[in-house]
Image (cartoon, grey):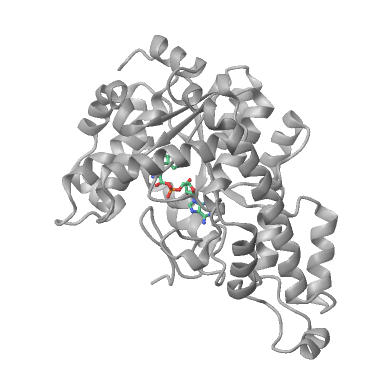
Amino acid sequence: MDEFEVSPWNVSGKIDYDKLIERFGTQKLENSLLEELKNLTGDLHLFLRRNVFFSHRDFDKILNDLKNGKGFYLYTGRGPSGPMHLGHLLPFIISKWFQEKFGLNVYIEITDDEKFLHSENLDLNDTYRFSMENALDIISLGFDEDRTFIFLDSEYIRNMYKLSLRVAKKVNYSTVKAVFGFKDSTNIGMLFYPTLQIVPTFFENRRCLIPEAIDQDPYWRIQRDIAESLGHYKASVIHSKFLPPLTGIEGKMSSSMPETAIYLNDSPDIVKRKIMKYAFSGGQATVEEHRKLGGNTDVDVAFQWLYMMFEEDDRRIKDLEQGYRKGEILTGEMKSILIEKINGFLVDFRNRREKYRDRLDRFMYDGKLAEKMWETFYDR
Ligand code: TYM
C-alpha cells in the first residue's frame, strides 16, 4: 500500500510524484518537450522551469498542432466551495501565460453543481455566491476579455446538456465507481457530474490542453476512452504538483483547513501572522545549531513556496537555497522574504480585482468568446 492518496476528493500523505506518474499512467514532462516549447515562446514560465508542472498527457501532440498551424484551446476549472487560496491559482496563472504566448481561447468551468452535490453544508445559494467571487478572482489574473469564457454549470447547462447526454451514454456505473470510488451511498447527481467536467473538452473542433493539479486527472481517463468514439480529440493535460500546506509538505493547501492556506483576501497582517505561526520550518531548533548545521530546504515551506511560485529570479532562488543550507539564512529571514513577496502579490491582485469587477459580465455572458460559442457550438 502506498502511504499517500491523490484523488479529486482527497489529497493526503507525502506525495511521491514519480510514483504518481506510474500510478496514473501519465508521462513525465521531459526537458526535451520544454525545450521545444521554449523554441516557440522564447522563454519558459517559472512553473515550467522549476518542474512545478511535472507530468502530462499528449503535450507532444499540442506542440505538433502548434507547429502545423492547427492550434489548440485551453480549458480548466474551479469548484466554488469557498474563497480561493493561493494554490488554486496555479492552473490559471499558467493558462494566462499560454493565452498570452499564443493568443489562445480559454474556457473556464465553474462547477457549482459539483460542489453543491459533494458538500453536505453548501446550498446552491452559497455555491452561486462563491462562483461569482471566484470567477472575479480568476479573471483578475489578467485574462484576455475577447478570448476567455467563464461559465457556471447550473447556468450554461442549457448548452451542454446534449453533449453531456452523449457522454453519459458511453460511461457505465462500474467505470465511474472504479475511477472515482463512488459507493452505494453516493448521491446520483455525483454519478452524472463527471459528464459535465468532460463536455468542455469538446467545445472546439481542435485539441484542448487542460492545465490543472494532478488530482483532477481521473476525469480525463474517462474522456480519453470515449472522445474518439464521439468524433472528438482526446484531451491533452499538463499536471502540476500541489502547493504544499503551510503546516508541512504533506498533502495540499486545503480550504477545509484554514491554517494551512493563504486566501486571496487575507490581509497583510493575517498573511504575516499565519506564516510566522504555522509555516513549517526546515531549520534547526536553535540559531546556534542552525548556523552550524544549516537547514533543509526540501521541507521548509517558506522556501518551497518561494521556489514554486514567488521568487521569479533563478539566481536569487539558488542563493536562498544555498544560504539556508549553509545556515547563513535563518528560518525567520526566509519567512520574512516570503511574507513580503506574498503581500506584494496580493495587494496588486486585489487592486486589479477592483478594476475587473465591472467587467465580469463580459467574461461570463456577453463577451466575444461567449458569443462566438453561441454561433458555432454545433451540438448543443
Ligand atoms: P478545485 O476548485 O478543487 O481546484 C481548482 C484547481 O486548482 C488545483 N488545485 C491546486 N493546485 C496547486 N496546489 C494546490 N494546493 C491546489 N489545490 C487545488 C486543482 O487541481 C484545480 O485545477 N472539479 C474541479 C473544477 C474543474 C476543473 C475542470 C479543474 C472543472 N473542470 C477542468 C481542472 C480542469 C475542482 O473542483 O477544482
Residue at the location (57% across, 23% down)? 145
Q: Quadrant of the N terminus?
A: bottom left
- From the viewer's perspective, is residue 345 above or below residue 169? below
Question: Which residue occupies the foreground of this view, 96 or 163?
Answer: 96
Using the rendered image of the protein, determine whether residue 12 is visible from the camera's viewpoint. yes
- From the viewer's perspective, is residue 37 above or below residue 364? below
- Residue 290 falls left or right of residue 213: right
- Residue 24 falls left or right of residue 315: left
Question: Which residue occupies the foreground of this view, 207 or 23?
Answer: 207
Residue at the location (78% across, 67% down)? 321
Residue at the location (74% across, 35% down)? 38
Task: Give the x, y percent position of residue 160.
Answer: 31, 25
Using the rendered image of the protein, determine whether residue 225 is visible from the camera's viewpoint. no
Task: Give the x, y percent position of residue 316.
Answer: 83, 58
Residue at the location (82% across, 79% down)? 327
- Residue 156 falls left or right of residue 303: left
- From the viewer's perspective, is residue 65 above or below residue 176? above
Task: Give the x, y percent position of residue 280.
Answer: 61, 74
- From the viewer's perspective, is residue 113 above or below residue 169? below
- Spot the residue most to the top: 375
